Image (cartoon, coloured by chain):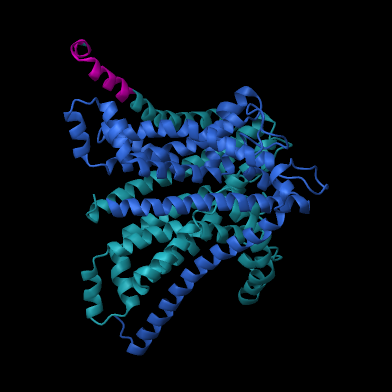
């Protein structure tokens, strides 16, 4: 190896150390820059009508995004109602029954693949499945797209959380003659409760900020989301449409919507993060 | 089955429960299969019409019904490449900073900050990219690069901010937390005896990191790169906002370009012609196949790494 002077080696080390510190600061700086921008511009959009009124036609000032807020909540709720129970069941199967069977292995493998599938592909898939046959966009199809995204996340976190429950607990319940299903629902689920809730919240946070799966399913609408069988207003697609529009009022509203989405998603993520940390320490 | 007649109602209820949970698990497989079948089915029209030309020709003409997606595929590959070139070295440096240079109490909080980059929804990256970062690129970074590298090749053309380079850089910030997290785990998994023996020989920290830690955890770092790759390649909203949506393949990285995801996001809802729609879905299918292959490869790789590092 080439001989290098101690001075050069130490200098080199200093430079790399400095670079690594700079890289970390750069990462934090970008996060700060994004949050600063979103908060600054988002707050300027906030007023009473922003939270209570329907959007006005372009060019007219005023108006709000109350319909999109309600729509996002409805879509996320509906997706949770569809995705979470099925995900829980799949997780129970993987942890309690399937374990190392070939079937369980392939389910695990494909849930990982499904989790890594780009969300826009899920949108295209649900479009071909639910929008094309019906002939028009619908809130239901948007909720289904979000549910498809939640399903593998809930399944895998459920499996992990149930695995953390000591088997002595299961065995003692079974030894008392409790059926397997009662053991799972009343004993194992209760022991893993906080972990399961965390997993569900994480899945909700993940999908509530999603735009791409809704672009071709729920689309968007300037009206109240009274009927989910038609296009449904939602915050994220509204941000996309308004940001791309040439009207400054609309861009302003897009910033307001961005702030709502960012705060919501970050809050849930932080909450679950700390809840998970505590959980891991305890076990 | 005779088993059913002999067993009590208790066991029967368990069989039912097991079957129901199995149904939930099976649904994941069914969705995966349906996803593939639907994508192939819906893009068949375009597959039949254009064949392989769809991949390597670059005409995107909805009016005359001719579609060749080379520009979108090129944009996806190049923007991902830029993101990887930036994010992998940056991720390794940040991991080194967090693991080797900072006390755990400090590195924990910096780590949380870096991880939060992953929690910011992609449409927020898009908003910030379009209204803040692209103008910054146009006003400061791109003119500076022109001065340094000269107005040729990769860095030619007007510095408008919107384009391939900006999209690649924003993608890099988005995948940075994923890469950092994995590399950080890899670094902490390297036994301290191995590092300490190198330090004992008089090596500087960088020499230890480069020749011991990185070499020891090389496979894990490749895994981290795979993870970042699969994230970047399917990212939609952030790219759509800033890439410029042009179906031309330009030599310059400053020029507006396109990606598979951006084309889908921009044109899908407006496509009414069956052939147009079919061509767009074929684009989606190509992306799906690409991410599928990357995922399979990375899962196989990670399993191998875990085995060789002795983690079950």
Q: Which residues are magenta?
A: B2-19
On the rendered structure, is A269 left or right of A69? Answer: left
Chain in cyan? B
**Rendering coords of residue A172 (x, y %):** 18, 34
Chain A display color? blue
Question: Is B109 in the magenta?
Answer: no
At x 33%, y 86%, the residue is A4
**Rendering coords of residue B207 (x, y %):** 32, 76
At x 39%, y 65%, the residue is B108
The answer to whether residue A120 is visible is yes
Q: Nearer the viewer, residue A41 or B284?
A: A41
At x 64%, y 44%, the residue is A235
In this rendering, the answer to whether A22 lies above or below A227 is below
In this rendering, the answer to whether B293 lies above or below A88 is below
Main secondary structure type of the part rendered in magenta: helix
Quadrant that contains the N terminus of chain A: bottom left
**Rendering coords of residue B224 (x, y %):** 39, 56
Question: Is B16 in the magenta?
Answer: yes
In this rendering, the answer to whether A260 lies above or below A82 is below
């Amino acid at each position: 190896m080439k001989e290098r002077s101690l001075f050069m080696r130490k200098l080199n080390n200093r430079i790399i150390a400095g670079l690594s510190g700079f890289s970390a600061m750069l990462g934090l700086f970008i996060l700060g820059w994004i949050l600063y921008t979103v908060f600054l511009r988002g707050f300027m959009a906030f007023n009473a009508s922003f939270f209570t009124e329907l959007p006005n036609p372009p060019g007219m000032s005023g108006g709000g995004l109350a319909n999109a807020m309600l729509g996002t909540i409805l879509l996320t709720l509906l997706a949770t109602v569809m995705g979470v129970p099925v995900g829980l069941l799949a997780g129970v199967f993987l942890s309690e029954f399937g374990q190392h069977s070939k079937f369980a292995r392939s389910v695990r493998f494909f849930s990982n693949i499904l989790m890594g599938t780009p969300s826009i592909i899920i949108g295209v898939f649900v479009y071909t499945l639910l929008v094309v046959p019906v002939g028009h966009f619908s809130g239901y199809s948007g909720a289904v797209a979000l549910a498809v995204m939640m399903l593998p996340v809930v399944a895998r976190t459920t499996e992990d959380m149930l695995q953390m429950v000591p088997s002595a607990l299961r065995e003692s319940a079974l030894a008392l003659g409790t059926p397997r299903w009662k053991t799972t629902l009343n004993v194992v689920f209760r022991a893993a409760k906080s972990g399961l809730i965390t997993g569900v919240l994480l899945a909700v946070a993940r999908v509530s900020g999603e735009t791409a799966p809704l672009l071709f399913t729920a689309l968007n609408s300037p009206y109240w989301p009274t009927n989910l069988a038609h296009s449904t207003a939602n915050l994220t697609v509204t941000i996309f449409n308004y940001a791309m529009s040439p009207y400054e009022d609309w861009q302003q509203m897009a910033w307001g919507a961005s702030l709502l989405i960012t705060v919501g998603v970050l809050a849930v993520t932080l909450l679950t993060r700390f809840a998970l940390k505590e959980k891991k320490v305890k076990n | 089955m005779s088993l059913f007649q002999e067993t009590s109602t208790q066991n029967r209820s368990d069989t039912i429960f097991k079957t129901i949970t199995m149904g939930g698990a099976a649904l994941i497989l069914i969705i995966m299969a349906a996803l593939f079948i639907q994508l192939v089915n819906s893009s068949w029209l375009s597959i039949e019409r254009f064949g392989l030309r769809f991949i390597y020709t670059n005409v995107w003409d909805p009016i005359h019904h001719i579609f060749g997606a080379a520009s979108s595929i090129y944009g996806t590959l190049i923007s991902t490449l830029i993101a990887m070139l930036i994010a992998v070295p940056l991720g390794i440096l940040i991991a080194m900073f967090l693991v080797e240079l900072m006390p755990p109490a400090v590195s924990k909080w910096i780590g949380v900050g870096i991880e939060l980059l992953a929690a910011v929804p992609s449409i927020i990256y898009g908003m910030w990219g379009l209204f803040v970062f692209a103008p910054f690129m146009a006003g400061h970074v791109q003119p500076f690069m022109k001065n340094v590298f000269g107005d040729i090749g990769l860095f030619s053309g007007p510095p408008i901010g919107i384009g391939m380079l900006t999209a690649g850089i924003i993608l890099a910030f988005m995948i940075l937390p994923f890469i950092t997290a994995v590399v950080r785990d890899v670094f902490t998994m390297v036994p301290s005896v191995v590092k300490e023996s190198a330090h004992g020989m008089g090596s500087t920290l960088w020499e230890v990191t480069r020749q011991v830690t990185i070499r020891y955890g090389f496979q894990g770092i490749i895994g981290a790169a795979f993870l970042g790759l699969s994230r970047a390649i399917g990212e939609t909203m952030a790219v759509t906002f800033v890439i410029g949506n042009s179906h031309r393949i330009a030599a310059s990285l400053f020029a507006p370009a396109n990606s598979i995801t951006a084309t889908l996001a921009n044109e899908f809802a407006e496509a009414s012609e069956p052939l147009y729609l079919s061509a767009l879905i074929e684009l989606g299918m190509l992306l799906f196949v690409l991410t599928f292959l990357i995922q399979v490869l990375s899962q196989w790789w990670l399993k191998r790494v875990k085995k060789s590092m002795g983690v079950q």
